[in-house]
Image: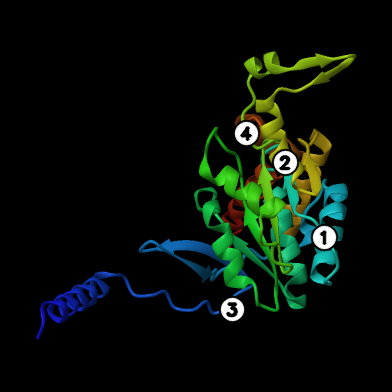
Amino acid sequence: MGDADKLIQSAEALLAHIEMLLPPAPAPTDWKASIAFRWRKRGGRGVIEAVSHVHKIGLGDLHGIDSQKKIVEQNTRQFVEGYPANNVLLTGARGTGKSSLIKALLNKYAPRGLRVIEVEKQDLIDLPEIVDHIDNRPERFILFCDDLSFEADEPGFKALKVVLDGSVAAASENCLIYATSNRRHLMPEYMTENLEAKRVDDEIHPGETVEEKISLSERFGVWASFYPFDQDEYLEIVAQWLSHFKIAGASSDAVRQAALQWALQRGSRSGRVAWQFARDWAGRSRVARGK
């Protein structure tokens, strides 16, 4: 046996040994296991995993955001029915129902083929790979990025821009990106950036840094803004959730005072705070009744 043959055998043996040390390839995604999925990394490889317990919230459970529901549902319906639709950015106050709205739309349109894949911010660089995974699927996919924000020079920022705006390869027709954020422009804005602005005739033109930040949010075709609830709206949401838990006296003075005190302690009158109060009150009420 010549030296070349020995070298080839040694290389093949080395490759076989390396393959034994590598983690096994992930199992194919079971698309019938759920209507919601997550992108996860396992041994350096990405896999789409089914979510076992999907939040069963409905659109009727969400109060105080009727205009936002109308905007986002219209876009989602167009998408599910195979018509042109846009990527969606939901921004505004925390706890006002941004992510809950996406979950509710999933529950409504899942029988018509809608699916959601949740992608963490640090995994946004994998978006092209995720799109390749679902390219030939018959379902319609929302790639969901929750509580999205970036610092300067994060790799996910550029990756998201490429997928939203398209690169040489066109984005898949069966997927859209829905993102929620407390920031309209998805990145922190600093006073010093205003110094970059220039006056051209009577117009003010933002500097390059501001333009870069605005450019990402502009790539979302639909914007929905969410605002803090006033006291009456907050109490209406509390009453709705207590009714959901089948608790009587949801509009009593005792409930109203307790709900307002709960919100005061947390410094927020949001839908999330109303939900948390209702769960606490319902639990206490049933313990008191021995049920």
The 10 Å Cα crowd at callout 4, few under 14, some 14 to 19, many 20 or more, is many
User: Where residue 239 sits in the image (x, y, percent)?
Assistant: 77, 49
Instruction: Classify residue 18 as left or right of residue 145.
Output: left
Q: Earlier in the sequence, mark 1 or mark 4?
A: 1
The amino acid type found where label 1 is placed reads: Ala
Q: Earlier in the sequence, mark 1 or mark 2?
A: 1
Q: Earlier in the sequence, mark 4 or mark 3?
A: 3
| Vertical relation: 253 (above or below) 1 | above
Residue 270, visible in the rendered structure = no
Splitting the image into 4 quarters, where does residue 149 fall?
top right
Which numbered dot is residue 187? 4
Q: Earlier in the sequence, mark 1 or mark 3?
A: 3
Q: Which residue is mark 1?
A: 85
Residue at horizontal 77 percent and vertical 47 percent from the top: 237
Q: Give the camera-side residue of 192 and 58.
A: 192
Where does the C terminus fall, quadrant-wise? Answer: bottom right
The amino acid type found where label 4 is placed reads: Met
